[in-house]
Image (spheres, grey):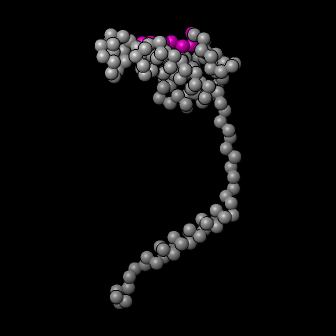
Amino acid sequence: MLWVNDRVALQEWELSESFSRSSGPGGQNVNKVSTAVELRFEAARSPSLDAATKRRLERLAGRRWTRDGAVLIRVEDTRSQARNRELARERLAELVARAFQKPRPRIATAPTRASKRRRLEAKTRRGAVKAARGRVDPGTE
């Protein structure tokens, strides 16, 4: 069981792990030991998440969200399989916890009088610059 916060825990059947060899430096160890962890969370089928949280999680997960509604987290940061498992679980818990936070609704505000005045003055100045760009009269040169 993976605890996301005080009230929400993801069941073990929702999670699956697979191990593979890590890329990068590591000497002979990297060729022998499968230390990279790919943690798969079946988010779409999860009873722990409501529909709104699942939508936010899909948006937050981005490319890590699969077509069948799972979140894939791959960790190969350390040479230790156990530490990579811990990191993957921490990252998943953090991602799901962020999905539980409802975004604050944006409150539309009207522009201030000063900002309207500055905008109009800038438009007037720009218009004057453009108006001064007329054709040059060949007789005045």
As for residue 16 lying within the magenta part, the answer is: yes
Left or right: where does residue 54 sit relative to residue 7?
left
Image quadrant containing the N terminus:
top right
Q: Quadrant of residue 3?
A: top right
- The magenta segment: 13-20
* Residue at the bottom extreme of this rendering: 139
Residue 85 visible, this angle: yes
Q: Main secondary structure of the magenta part?
A: strand
Left or right: where does residue 5 sit relative to residue 41?
right
As for residue 119 lying within the magenta part, the answer is: no
Left or right: where does residue 10 sit relative to residue 20?
right
Q: Quadrant of residue 24?
A: top left
* Position above or below: 123 against 109: below
Residue 54 visible, this angle: no
x, y percent for residue 100: 64, 27
At 45% from the left and 20% from the top, the residue drawn is 75
At 57% from the left and 9% from the top, the residue drawn is 13
x, y percent for residue 57: 58, 27
Image quadrant containing the C terminus:
bottom left
x, y percent for residue 52: 64, 28
Left or right: where does residue 15 sit relative to residue 27?
right
Number of labelled discs?
0
* Position above or below: 37 against 101: above
At 43% from the left and 14% from the top, the residue drawn is 80
x, y percent for residue 61: 52, 28
